[in-house]
Image: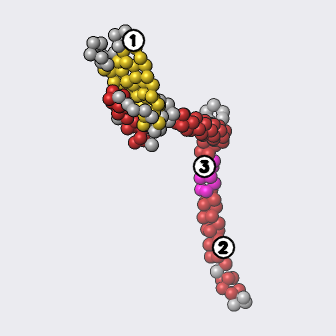
Amino acid sequence: MQALDPVIRENLSFIVLGLAGMTLVLGAGLVIQSRRLNQVRRKWQMLLDEANGGNLERMLYDHLKERMKIESDLEAARTRLKALEEIATTGKRFMGVVRYDAFPDVGGQQSFAMALFDDRGEGFILSSIVGRSDCRVFCKALSGGKAQRELTKEEQEALDLASRSNLKKVLVSSS
């Protein structure tokens, strides 16, 4: 340490000037950083303060609250949709109708066979046979898409027509 004493005394003015220069450089850096910090604070304050007096924090809170409500409503809608889809599988929506003349002396194709069933093939075939003096109606149950009783040609045609309906193809492909 004593060896450094003479060196320090001889170069004291240079050391003081160097330290003063470093102090000026650090002071200038501090001023520059202070100005940058003030600019950031002003920008942040402008971001936080809305024109109508609210702030960003409040807007974010309101947005989050609204989003939570929308998610809740969406989940309720999904639940209702699932219930409706389950109900829709039992809806009699596949239909085929065949009109025909049951007797040669009665025209106008007033007799008909109508097949109506759901996704599982549960339903019925309704037949109406119109004669000159009377009208008869028959109903045959369907289970799994098959009739429990023997079908007439027109009833089978109505069942086939309902089985080939476009609605069924759309529903089967989307499942």
Give the x, y percent position of residue 137: 43, 19
Pick whichever of labels 1 and 3 is earlier in the sequence.
3
Mark 2 against mark 1, which lies toward the viewer? 1
Residue at (54, 37) in percent of width and height: 86
Specify the farthest residue to the left. 104
Q: Kindly indicate the quadrant of the structure image that contains residue 93.
A: top left
Q: In the figure, 46 relative to 14: above or below?
A: above
- In the rendered image, the quadrant that contains the C terminus is top left
Question: Which of the two discs, 2 and 3, labels the residue nearer the N terminus?
Answer: 2
Label for residue 134? 1
- Whether residue 4 is visible here, answered yes or no, is yes
Which dot marks residue 78?
none
- Residue 74 x/y as whole percent: 58, 37
Q: Position of residue 85 (x, y in %)?
A: 52, 36
Front residue of 51 and 150: 150
Q: Quadrant of residue 7?
A: bottom right
Say which residue appears at 37% left-offset and 24% top-offset.
113
The residue segment tinted magenta is 32-41
